[in-house]
């Protein structure tokens, strides 16, 4: 007999996955964007309160935390789900498709929320753990701002966590597969903006001008050598120049030229190496071309690095839930996407792991695509993972 069955009467819905699949579809049909997730947060809060959680609202905006203490254990665990959708129109035919044009749950955060709610109900029913469980529901993951907003609003001071964990669905990997990888797992994302100021003039008299376009041209070539000449083969990085802007017509040398660069790396150290090299190139070009160059780095998210100890513990805890060979310790392919749970992992040890979302037309379709859909089978798979992990960690 499971621990759950003992308290079945108190929480008749806890093991009925259809209830949580309905919640998932309800959230999917009414997506909310960025930090503006009041209805989703209200729905989550209402359910958690119904199951006996102490709910704390409006943490870093519409973020909320549900707390459940069982026994006298001193350990405290944080599990995080994201709640926000994307500013794009859904092109799926099914009944639960988004009702709001220009908004879509195309990353499966509706599913992550439903998974954590299903686990919340089951854990409240079984109470088969000893310690403090903090369920963290976060807005604005896609804007890479929600996690930081909650941390800045005192998340870990108000709700101490020995470690924090989160999961994401992974389209293209079959349902029933899982990756728990330790170390660097998702990339940092940084925007670099460069503005070069020279001296404009007539195209016929370049000797009277200081041409910012020549400096820009040379700087582009220099930046393109960073990855090939300054990084080691094991330094993962993507450096993409996404925008250049200068001039108006063919015969005027403009005053200014500018560019925007996207830099992604899988460690802080590699990011620092690249930034240092960009600074050196900028200084060198300012000097050799006689221009002024403004340089600005904007950190959008740090690299997500899973701590080794917690990742190993989680992997061993989850092992009995998966068939042999279906629980992987390495991602099949390097991912250079970003995830703002990285901020929480800078503050606390923990792990961000992946669950296969399936293959085929909708479930195998890439996230952020108008045909993607979260796979409802994962509500069971994911909540099984959370329940097992809470029971193993909070002892
Ligand atoms: Zn996304
Ligand atoms: Zn996502």
Image (cartoon, rainbow, N blue to C red):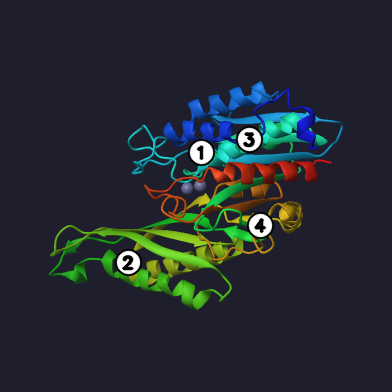
| Residue at the image position 42 percent from the left and 35 percent from the top | 96
Along the line of sight, the residue nearer the viewer: 313 or 155: 313
Q: CA distance from mark 1 to mark 2?
A: 44 Å
Q: Secondary structure at mark 1?
A: helix
Q: Which mark is residue 360?
A: none
Q: CA distance from mark 3 to mark 2?
A: 54 Å
Q: Earlier in the sequence, mark 1 or mark 2?
A: 1
- The residue that disc 2 covers is 216
6 lies left or right of 297: right
Q: Secondary structure at mark 3?
A: helix
| Residue at the image position 47 percent from the left and 77 percent from the top | 228
- The residue that disc 4 covers is 180
Q: Dividing the image into 4 quarters, which one contains the N terminus? A: top right
> Which x, y percent locates residue 189?
50, 55
- The residue that disc 1 covers is 110
Q: In this rendering, does residue 149 appear at all?
A: no
Q: Secondary structure at mark 2?
A: helix
Q: Earlier in the sequence, mark 3 or mark 2?
A: 3
Mark 4 Cα-neighbour bin, 10 Å: few <14, some 14–19, many ≥20? many
> Which x, y percent locates residue 138?
57, 36
Mark 1 Cα-neighbour bin, 10 Å: few <14, some 14–19, many ≥20? many
Q: In this rendering, does residue 240 appear at all?
A: yes
Along the line of sight, the residue nearer the viewer: 224 or 208: 224
Along the line of sight, the residue nearer the viewer: 97 or 54: 97
């Amino acid at each position: 007999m499971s621990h759950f069955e003992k308290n079945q009467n108190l929480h008749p819905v806890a093991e009925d996955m259809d209830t949580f699949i309905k919640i998932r579809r309800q959230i999917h049909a009414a997506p909310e964007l960025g930090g503006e997730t009041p209805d989703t947060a209200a729905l989550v809060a209402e359910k958690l309160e119904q199951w006996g959680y102490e709910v704390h609202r409006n943490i870093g905006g519409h973020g909320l935390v549900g707390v459940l203490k069982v026994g006298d254990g001193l350990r405290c665990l944080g599990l995080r789900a994201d709640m926000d959708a994307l500013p794009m129109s859904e092109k799926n035919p099914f009944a639960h498709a988004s009702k709001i044009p220009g908004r879509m749950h195309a990353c499966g955060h509706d599913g992550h929320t439903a998974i954590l709610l299903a686990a919340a109900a089951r854990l409240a029913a079984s109470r088969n753990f000893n310690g403090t469980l903090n369920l963290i529901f976060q807005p604005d993951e896609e804007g890479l701002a929600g996690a930081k907003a909650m941390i800045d609003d005192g998340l870990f001071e108000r709700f101490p966590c020995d470690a924090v964990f989160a999961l994401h669905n992974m389209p293209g990997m079959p349902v029933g597969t899982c990756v728990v990888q330790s170390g660097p797992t998702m990339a940092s994302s940084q925007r670099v903006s460069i503005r070069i100021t020279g001296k404009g003039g007539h195209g016929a008299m370049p000797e009277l001008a200081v041409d910012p376009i020549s400096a820009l041209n040379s700087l582009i070539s220099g930046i393109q050598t960073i990855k090939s000449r300054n990084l080691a083969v094991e330094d993962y990085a993507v450096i993409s120049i996404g925008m250049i802007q200068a001039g108006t017509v063919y015969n005027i040398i403009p005053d200014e030229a500018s560019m925007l660069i996207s830099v992604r790396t899988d460690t802080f150290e590699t990011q620092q190496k690249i930034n240092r090299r960009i600074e050196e190139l900028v200084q060198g070009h300012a000097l050799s071309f006689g221009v002024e160059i403004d340089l600005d780095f904007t950190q959008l998210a740090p690299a997500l690095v899973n701590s080794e100890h917690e990742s190993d513990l989680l992997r061993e805890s989850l092992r009995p839930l998966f068939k042999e060979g279906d629980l992987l310790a390495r991602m099949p392919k390097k991912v250079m996407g970003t995830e703002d749970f990285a901020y929480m992992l800078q503050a606390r040890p923990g792990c961000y792991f992946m669950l296969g979302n399936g293959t085929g037309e909708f479930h195998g379709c890439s996230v952020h695509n108008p045909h993607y859909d979260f796979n409802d089978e994962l509500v069971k798979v994911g909540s099984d993972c959370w329940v097992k992990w809470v029971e193993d960690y909070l002892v």
